[in-house]
Image (tube, rainbow, N blue to C red):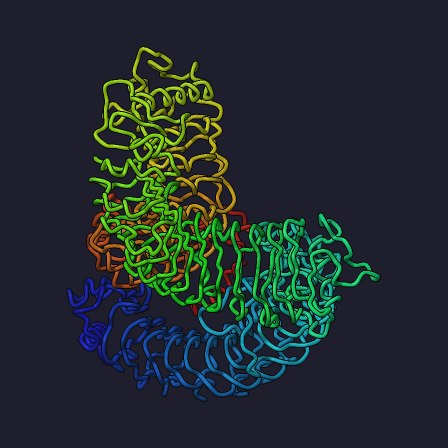
Amino acid sequence: EAEDIDILEEIYFSLDGSNWDDNDGWLEGHDICNWSGVECYEDGNDRAGHVKVLNLEHNSLDGDVPSLIWNLPFVVEIDLKENDITVDFDGIENARYLETLRLSETGLKSVDGISKAPSIKSLHLTSNAMKNIPDELYEMQSLESIFLNYNEISGQLSPKIGQWTNMRNLFLFHNEITGSIPATIGQMTKLQILALGENYLTGSIPEEINTLKELEIIAFQREAGETAPGVGGPITSIEDDGWGLTGQLPAFDGLPNLKELYLGSNQLTGTIPPNFLKGVTEKADEIHVDLTLNNLEGTVPSELKAFDAMFLYVAGNKITGVADELCSKQNWMGGEVAEAECDAILCPPNAYNDFGRQTGSDTPCTQCPFTYGSEYYGSSGCGFGQMEDMSDVGILRLFYVATGGDSWVNNAGWMEDDTPVCEWHGIHCVGGVVDALHLPSNQLTGTVPPIIFQLSSLQIFNVGDNPVDVIFSGIESAGELEGLYLDATLVKDITGISEARNLRTLHLQQNDFGSADIPEEIFELEDLRHLYLSNSNFAGPLSNKIGNLVNLEEFYCHGNYLSGTIPGEIGNLQEAEIINLSENFFTGELPPELTNLRRLKTLFIDSFTRSTAGLSGPLPAFDQMPSLRELYLGSNSLTGTIPEGLLGGVSDRDERITIGLKSNQLTGTVPEALLRFSHLNIDIAGNMIEEIPQSLCEMKHWMDGTVDKYGCEAILCEPGKFNQFGRQSTEEHPCMDCGGSETSPYLGSVFCLSEEKHREKQILKLFYQKTGGRNWKSKDNWNNDDVDICHWYGVSCHEGRTVSSLQLGSNNLVGTPPREIFDLPNLKWLWLFSNPIDFKFDGIGQAGQLTSLLLDSTGLTSLEGVGDAFALVDLDVRFNRLSGSLPTEISRLLNLVTFSCADNNLSGEFPSLSRLKKLQNLRAGNNKFSGQLPAFSTHPDLTTVDLSGNRFEGPIPPDFLGSTDASEPIYIDLTSNSIDGVVPGGLSRFDTLTLYLKDNRITGIDQSLCRQEKWNGGDVGAFDCDGILCPTGTWAPGVGRASKDGVQCEACEFSMTFGLSECSREAGLGLRGQSSVGALRVGAVTLISFFTALVVLGL
């Protein structure tokens, strides 16, 4: 017979041993017990020196496994999983002592001959390509555990399954098994885990299962695929394709050891039996039951009160009640019942949320909108009632009730039977049929029910200036609807509005759309004539689909946060007469296609309140636009001279013409060719204009006739003079001489240094007074009129002119800094960190140059208003008392490079911040953010991400930092979250990466990452994968990985995930620093137990 060493050498050469990831010791000497992956019997045993365990898992083995492997005379365990090999079981009968065989993820297609193995107890065949369960597997009566998850097994389960009388753990997750569960399963009396979920089973659950006294886990759920939501997560219905277990829900009352029961997404019927799980012995222990998305009826029975710590998921059924006794079970649902009572089990009828139950204070059960409803407990949505045949009067009565009609300002005639509906206040009729509702500023509240659109002759609907929401479902029924007036309402979502195909006028001004893009549905309303979107918190680029609205005559979109360039498709709006895009964040040059708009009369693209943006490039002549009468392009960054042919195409030159070009960067002389306009108002103050031809100063009708009074100064103040308008418009506002020695060579100055410094001094004195200046630690020169403000402590000025920075960190400031501080026009840095102040962002929009704001350790409690600080590049609000979700207005800060909000109490999902394209550094650690980890895949410059110490879950997205330059040094800290899965290979694109991932729920590392020698300061080069995370079964004190600082990965019996930094049972289960109950909740998804983790992993 071959010796062990001969067999091992044959294995080495057959499976390309020289290229294994770990071949330490192989072929070096005759002591095979020191070869990597080989464990021998110890001295003193009569088998000493022989192979006991051969573990070559995940080691880049390649080739055909030699049949000689089965001749290892005393081998007990062979592990070859996660290798590219083929296995032949010829000769396996020689492995007389082999008990455990792991061949998962090897591409195995057949196990022919395996039944000859006389002693195998544990067989691992997960994630292979097996098509069926061969009969010979059923002959292996010594089997105690078999893992066949994630194969391609089809067909029905054989009754021969009952031959596995010693089976304890049966795993057949995620295959294509059909048919019913055979009754012979009742012969498997030692069964502890029965996992048949994610298949296509049908028929009823055999009653024989109720005789399996050792069962701890039953998993028959039908959620399909690896991306199925976690148990207790949002309710996601799957297609009703006829699959799923049917029949009455069994009581399972004969299973004393049952701990987990998963039956979700089947077609079980009937009620939950009163004796459900009655036989469970330890009713004080946690028990998990998933019955979601079946067809169960009736009441959740009171008898379940016998369980002290139940997790019962039963949403998505036809439940009509929850026994009152259950709503006081303090430890149910991980303690959530103590907070939300019945709602933590199921939302009541006519209420809903994504989970069908309240999962925390931030996910309450929400009442269905009026005329919508949910009939049963545990709904994840509301349905529209069947009301198509209701009369106009009936519809209006519902509308009245839904919008608080009794509290309207004017409800004359409404609900009065003896008053015709056409005489009700706000109702207009034609021929006795309602065609318009006019109820603006009438104190309507609540939600306008979509039944209103069943008024088939409705043409105008006006509920503007009311605190009311509108649902657009069914709007297609209002086929004659032409006008929607919804300004200043609570509308935030217009889903469905595109079905209003005949809409001509749409008013959505003064709403709050949360910095969202302009909804695409608007651009499908191709019959629109009048579109009003101003001051509604829209952001992002103006879509090139604006060109679809070819019939548009008026487009008002000022006062939003639109960014990027104006698309050339705007030139398609050839019917447009008014376009107002002022006070947004447009950049780049004006599109030449604007000259196509020959009907355009008025164009507004000012940027007076958006000082960090602005159009650039030369000022176009607009000389092909005969109708243009008003052009406003103030406070941009237009350069060059004023074109000689400006508005040269205007047809009637005796009309009043208005041109606003204030505060750009225009140079040169005002062109004399403008003499062609007899009534011109032109504002060109605040530029770099050097000359006005005298002939223009004689145009007596210019500037509303003031040129006749004040000559050239009615157009521009002469050099060395100024006023706030840059010109004289009245006797009360003459051009004034600048004090001091400074003079400007340009006409039209709106600023004088000496005057400005005096104003700034008054602001600084007020700041000193309001923040307890007398008790500041340092206050040199403050309030000393004999010292220039630029020399006051903490104040800096640019070139000795106006205040550019205020640096008073850790200086014992108190109180509330006055909002006037934001009126310092050139303030760039405001550093007030480590002071116990009550900081408010009111008025920060005035600080148009403010780029750096440091407010860490100030006791800050709110970020309300920060979104107006458009110029911010660096915002630090760490170590404060911020709570709740991160406000969406952060997404308005388009220039942000560094955002630090770590060490607060912020919670909820972390926003994608996708608009912040300049972001480089993000620090948000030690908060309570939850949900999926954002990918940040659209941030080309983001190189530092710290989200440690939060509650993120799910895997690291494969495209994490997908747009970041791979050659840049990258820093990522995701430690101490609940991130799971495998560290993705997509990160291998980074050359130099510092990656912290300890204390999560990570189950693997893509092998490509283990060759990144520069990562983690060279630790990966020194320790391979261990330099990223210690594997399961090990830990590294404090850091969870090996490092050149002397820390190594050490054995830990409690370690079930990668990257453990503490060897304890709590840490091993991912519960470190959490209570055993609270740890079962991460965000809104209840984690499955340790046992279920085994099921999913197929261990």
Q: Is residue 346 visible?
A: no
84 displayed left or right of 413: left
Q: Residue at x 48, y 44 (%)?
A: 906
Residue 539 versus residue 1057: which sits nearer the camera? 539
Q: Is residue 842 above or below residue 467?
A: above
Q: Is residue 149 above or below residue 1003?
A: below
508 displayed left or right of 540: right
801 displayed left or right of 914: left
Q: Quadrant of residue 1024?
A: bottom left
Q: Check the image and name the residue furthest to the right.
A: 418
Q: Is residue 534 visible?
A: yes
Residue 272 versus residue 838: which sits nearer the camera? 838
Residue 671 versus residue 577: which sits nearer the camera? 671
Q: Quadrant of residue 768?
A: top left
Query: Which quarter of the rendering shows the N terminus?
Result: bottom left
Q: Position of residue 106 (x, y in %)?
A: 32, 76
Q: Position of residue 1077 (x, y in %)?
A: 57, 51
Q: Position of residue 6 (x, y in %)?
A: 20, 75
Figure label count: 0
Q: Residue at x 24, y 70 (%)?
A: 60
Q: Position of residue 144 (x, y in %)?
A: 48, 74
Query: Which quarter of the rendering shows the C terminus?
Result: bottom left
